[in-house]
Image (cartoon, rainbow, N blue to C red):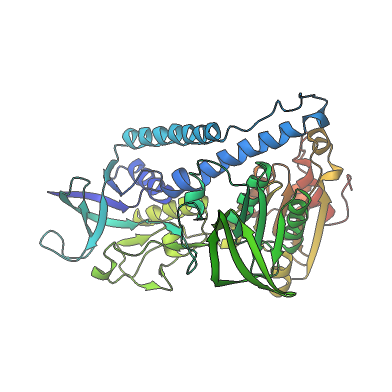
Amino acid sequence: MTIQCDLAIIGGGIAGYTAAIKAAQAGKKVIVVEREKLGGTCLHKGCIPSKALLRSAEVYATMRKADTYGIHVAEGAISLDFPKVQRRKENTVEGLYKGLQYLMRKHNITVMQGSGRVIGPSIFSPKSGSVAVELPDGEMETIVPTNLIIATGSRPRSLPGLEPKQGEIMSSDEALTMDELPESILIVGGGVIGVEWASMLIDFGVEVTLIEAASRLLPGEDAEASAELAKQLRRRGVRILTGIQLKLDTYTYNDGQASITADTADGPVILNAERLLVSVGRQANVEEIGLENTDVRVEKGVIRVNGYFQTNEPHIYAIGDVNGGLQLAHAAAHEGIVAVDHMLGGKEQAPDHSRVPRAIYSKPELASIGLTEDEARKQGHDIKVGKVPFQAIGKAHVLGETDGFAKVIADAKTNDVLGVHLIGPHATDLLSEASLAMLLNATPWEVGQVIHPHPTLSEVLGEAMLAVHGNSLAF
């Protein structure tokens, strides 16, 4: 059977379904092909389930220190029901999944479950971009679209010899489905995923060792924020080792214990834990989707695109993790909007990566946008820095979470905001004001004139903006 449409999308994750809705709102006939579940990694294996687990860990940790807030809990009264934690996570995902299915119906978007593969020119279309879909029952369908979007996402990257193995080694995908918590875990990789899992598991009472090959955690983030996060994780009991090179051929698993040797500045050390979690980045899903039948170029494992997310074939676009950009759900969604806007004749291009906010949901949370202090200096900016600790903010004391700070980096000549970095309570929720300020090219002085309600955590950003010129009233 052959079906014609205005837009076909291979991949129903946040990039794909956002693009689908955008196109459907413009009156286009849209078909989304998804081999697993609509919602993709973010909904089913990433953003949502991991944050649901982080919330349970946060509540458990807070209950264990309830006495700090004047609430006495009888000894032994607090216990962790991890299967129930997992059920809550699954219910959260399922509720959002049903909501997403409703949106597809509302916008008359056809969702086909099956494996999509791009095919070359045929009797149905003189150009490549048609999609052959293998349905679950083995039947085949062919979609002939005017435009095609590839939004096949990414998967966890593994290390040779440390591929996922039942009961021993996990990627973040397997970690989300654990039946029970291990007593100890070694997390390989101190990036966003590794840091979030370390924060979660230490709150659940797991003994955590976190290792990173670079000289510090989160090497892409501001050095001061990275150092503050490492300090607070260590204070909570996480063992952090940086500058580590694993000797992969030394890995063994005996009597319920994983063991591996690592080279450090002080010589080789043997690392032991009940389980390993490997979080060393993700790789694009470019295989087995028929790209060899097109002129689409794959370079360094990702699809090459222009500023509108077009490939070498102008009617084929690639959005989200598959094009090697920022591996962030909100960035992928925005790429879908830009791509469809361009199909419809618009000229909006992808924003500079420095204008895309970044969020890390550890405890404390870390959120940032724009350049780090090191990046700003390397780019030749003469900078001014404003920094205010949460210790100076009344609401932080009310919450009992006064660690961390807000940091604003501005150009001393132009007064442009170059970067904003927050580490502390609800940092991810506070960042949007900085994102709006950068979109509107607001100066630190202008943002500092905004009247922030008191007492709120939002005051920390206003004070940090004022601090750029030495005018903070709180610090």
Number of residue marks: 0
Q: Is residue 281 left or right of residue 138?
A: right
> As rendered, which of 374 and 411 lies closer to the eye?
374
102 is higher (above) or lower (below) than 342: above
Q: Which residue lies most toward the front here?
A: 255
Q: Is residue 116 left or right of residue 389?
A: left
> As rendered, which of 106 and 140 lies closer to the eye?
140
Q: Is residue 174 left or right of residue 3?
A: right
Residue 300: image x %, image y %?
Answer: 43, 73
The answer, for residue 313, to whether it is visible in the render is yes
The quadrant in which residue 272 appears is bottom right
**Residue at image location 70% in from the left, 70% down from the top:** 215
**Residue at image location 85% in from the left, 57% down from the top:** 469
342 is higher (above) or lower (below) than 460: below
Q: Is residue 171 left or right of residue 429?
A: left
204 is higher (above) or lower (below) than 440: above
> As rendered, which of 71 and 46 lies closer to the eye?
71
Residue 340: image x %, image y %?
Answer: 38, 53
> As rendered, which of 164 and 421 lies closer to the eye?
164
**Residue at image location 58% in from the left, 43% down from the top:** 181
Q: Which residue lies most toward the left here?
A: 123
The quadrant in which residue 37 appears is top left
The answer, for residue 417, to whether it is visible in the render is no
**Residue at image location 73% in from the left, 52% down from the top:** 233
Residue 261: image x %, image y %?
Answer: 62, 70
Residue 135: image x %, image y %?
Answer: 21, 48
